[in-house]
Image (cartoon, helix red, strand yellow):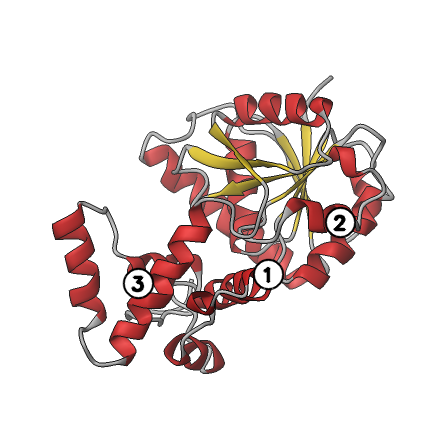
Amino acid sequence: MIMKIGVLGAGVMGAAIATLAIGHGVAVVLVDVDDDTLAKARKEVRQQLKLARLMGQLPRSGEAELVTTTNYGDLADVTSVIEAVTEKPELKAKVLAEVSAIVRPGTVIVSNTSAIPVDEMADAVARPEDLCAIHFMNPPYLIRAVEVIRGPRTGDEAMLKVTELLAALDRDGVVVGDGPGFVINRILQRSINEAARIVEEGRATPEAVDAAFEGCLGHRTGPLATADLIGLDNVVDSLRVLHDRTGDRGYEPCDLLVAKVAAGDFGRKTGRGFYEHGGAL
C-alpha cells in the first residue's frame, strides 16, 4: 500500500511535519479549518523544503504531493493520521473524535502532543487501540529523534505501523511510557519555567541564563531561546497541562511567561519573546 499521511492542523508544527513527509516522498493531506492558514502553510512548506535541502537534511528530489483542504472527508483513504493542533485537551479530543469517525479501522492515529497523556485522549476516539503519540521536536525536518508514546490501550499493530511511518520519514523513535509530559517536557518545561522565573526575579537576563546553559552545560541552545522556538503560548499551555495533572507547583506558569503570552509575544513566530527575532514568521 502506498503511504499517505493526513496532518491535522496547518500551524507551525503541522506545516513542518508536512515538509518532512513530502520531502521524503510521502504524500500529505493537510487539513485546517481556515483557508488563509492553509495558504500560509503552503508557502512555509516551500520555504522549509528549500532550507532543509540546502542543509542536506532532506533529499534533493522525490518530493511527494501536498493537498490542502478544510474537508475531513479527504482523509478517508490515508494510511495514517498525525494530529498537530494546539496543545489544548478539549480541542485535541474534538479533532481526534472527528477523524477517528472517518478513517478506516486499523488506520493509526498519532497525536503530536507534547504533554497530554495518550490514555486521556484515547477516551475521545472510536478505537483506542489505534491511537498513540509521537512528540516531534521543532523543526521536525531538522531534528531526527522523536519521542514515541505508547498508551495503555495502544495496540501492537498501531506500534508496528508507527515504526513503518518513522522509517519512511527517516526519523529515530525513542519509545517511552505514557504520563503527563512524557520525558522531554516533564523535564524541559520545568526548566523553562524556572529560567523565566529567574529573569522575572531580576537575577539574570535571558542572555545570561542561556549563556550559562550553553557554556557551562554544553547545551546547543539555552532554555529561553528554546522557549521562543517552541512558542511561549505553547509553553504556557503545556505547563498548565502538567500542573493540572500532577499538582506540582513547579509547573504553574510564572507571571512573566503569562504576561508575555497575554501581550502576544510568543517568540519566533510573532517576532518577539524573550528575544527580538526581526518580525513575525
- What amino acid is found at the position of numbered circle 3 in the picture? Leu
Q: Splitting the image into 4 quarters, where does residue 93 fall?
A: bottom right
- Image x and y of residue 122, in percent: 75, 45
Left or right of 187? Residue 201 is left
Would you say residue 277 is visible in this rendering?
A: no
Q: Splitting the image into 4 quarters, where does residue 26 fall?
A: top right
- What amino acid is found at the position of numbered circle 2 in the picture? Leu
Q: Which residue is mark 2?
A: 96
As rendered, which of 254 and 247 lies closer to the eye?
A: 247
Task: State the residue at coordinates (18%, 76%).
Answer: 203
Work out which quarter of the rendered image holds the C terminus and state it: bottom left
Secondary element type, mark 1: helix
Q: Which residue is mark 1?
A: 245
Task: State the residue at coordinates (65%, 36%).
Answer: 28
Task: State the residue at coordinates (52%, 40%).
Answer: 19
- Image x and y of residue 271, in percent: 37, 69
Q: Which residue is mark 3?
A: 224
- Image x and y of residue 255, in percent: 41, 81
Crowding near pointer 1: few (<14 within 10 Å), some, many (20+)? some
Task: Name the mark nearer the viewer: 1 or 3.
Answer: 1
As rendered, which of 49 and 188 lies closer to the eye?
A: 188
Left or right of 224? Residue 111 is right
Would you say residue 36 is visible in this rendering?
A: yes
Tell me which numbered mark, 3 or 2, is placed earlier along the sequence.
2
As rendered, which of 32 and 203 lies closer to the eye?
A: 203
Secondary element type, mark 3: helix
- What amino acid is found at the position of numbered circle 1 in the picture? Arg
